[in-house]
Image: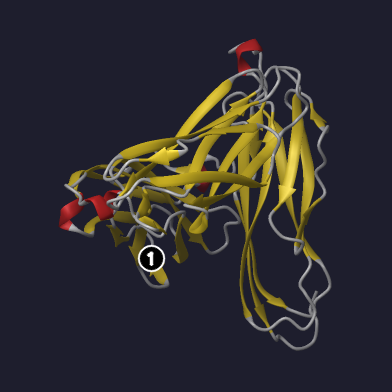
Amino acid sequence: MALLSLTEVSAEECVLRFEPERVDFGHINESDGIVTRSFTIINTSDKEITISEIVSTCDCTVADYKNVVIAPKQSFEVKVSYNPLNRPGRFDRPLFIFVEGYDAPFEISIIGRVTPRERTIEEIYFYDMGHGLLFDNTFAGFAYIEHGKQYEERIALYNNSDRTLRLRLKHIERSGAIRAEYPKSVAPHTSADIKFYYELPLKSKRYGSLDDKFEIKVNGKRGKYTLSAHGIAVDNFDFYDDILSPRAQYSKKIIKFGDVNSDALPISATLTITNRGEAPLVIRDVRCSSPEVECTLKAGTIVEPGATHATEIVLMPKRGMSEGSLSEQVAIVTDDPITPYQVIRVTATYKQIGQNKY
């Protein structure tokens, strides 16, 4: 059964089956707009099952559903829409199905490939910096930056004017690990690249997010947008044995606190990390995206093979905060060569519940 849960679930506990086991959109055309497919959730148990929520990791993927109760041995069809606009190439998106009475969601994959359409200059170079200078992007997204290796990403630009444009790039936020190369001038109606290089020394102790930001000036005047680059510093895995290496398994990838009194005391949820590998697992870096969320896990923590380490994700609501939703992240970097970077999503809804029940 190609059904996944974010915690270990025995065969007796697998109460849902998906048909098909993953939703394949096949080849779709970007020019055709939003495309819809469906899959069926089958309740294989002898009890009613309530689907409370279906969550996507991207706003390009939307599941059409309501709070659903599925009777024993019955099924329910879910329609899934994918928006291919500006998303050419292959896609593989998970949908998380939350079931009442289960702490961890079930998961199904949404896959396919988007055939791009022909685009105008303005569509290719979407970001207008001003003065006739167009960019295809303002963000250079790097994946893992392994120590001792150099990585390159590019942002393309186009001079859409009838005059030569002079460029100047100014570093305004520094990680200390990036280098930028760019043309000092661009002739009329020609394109060029800004090249970014991330590199960390082999013996570097730097782990986690690397963030840089640049201001660009066109003919001495500040451009409309800033440029940014991001990478994640991890170990050099060329030195790791494919078999004798650590493997991190997380009990949850989404922690839902539900409705929270904005004047409540700090509340917490437990996250466990199990080392399924054959070597000690080392926690390299832990970062929370907001002061409202804390994690008791510390860099340097070691989880021995076969062992489990429990940590607390703590939500600290701001007193007097108005009602609204919260969606934050806890990012964990380890020396697991397969999945060195794991993001734990933390959600809550602030409400004036009255007396503090926590």
User: Where does the image place residue 285, in percent across and percent down from the top left?
Assistant: 75, 38
Q: Quadrant of the N terminus?
A: top left
Camera-nearest residue between 119 and 69: 119
Q: Is residue 334 above or below residue 173?
A: above
Camera-nearest residue between 99 and 205: 205
Q: Is residue 289 above or below residue 180?
A: below
Q: Residue at x 69, y 17 (%)?
A: 278
Left or right relative to 203: residue 19: left
Q: Residue at x 71, y 35 (%)?
A: 176
Residue identifier under label 1: 70
Q: How is the image coloured?
A: secondary structure
- Which image quadrant is residue 109 in? top left
User: Where does the image place residue 251, in percent across and percent down from the top left?
Assistant: 65, 44
Q: Is residue 6 above or below residue 131?
A: above
Left or right relative to 165: residue 206: right
User: Where does the image place residue 269, in percent across and percent down from the top left?
Assistant: 74, 57
Q: Amino acid at mark 1?
A: Ile
Badge 1 marks a residue whose secondary structure is: strand
Task: Tell me the crowding category of disc 1: few under 14, some 14 to 19, or many 20 or more residues within 10 angstroms, Cα based.
Answer: some
Camera-nearest residue between 264 and 189: 189
Q: Quadrant of the C terminus?
A: bottom right
User: Where does the image place residue 322, in percent across and percent down from the top left?
Assistant: 68, 84
Q: Residue at x 54, y 40 (%)?
A: 10
Q: Residue at x 78, y 38 (%)?
A: 309
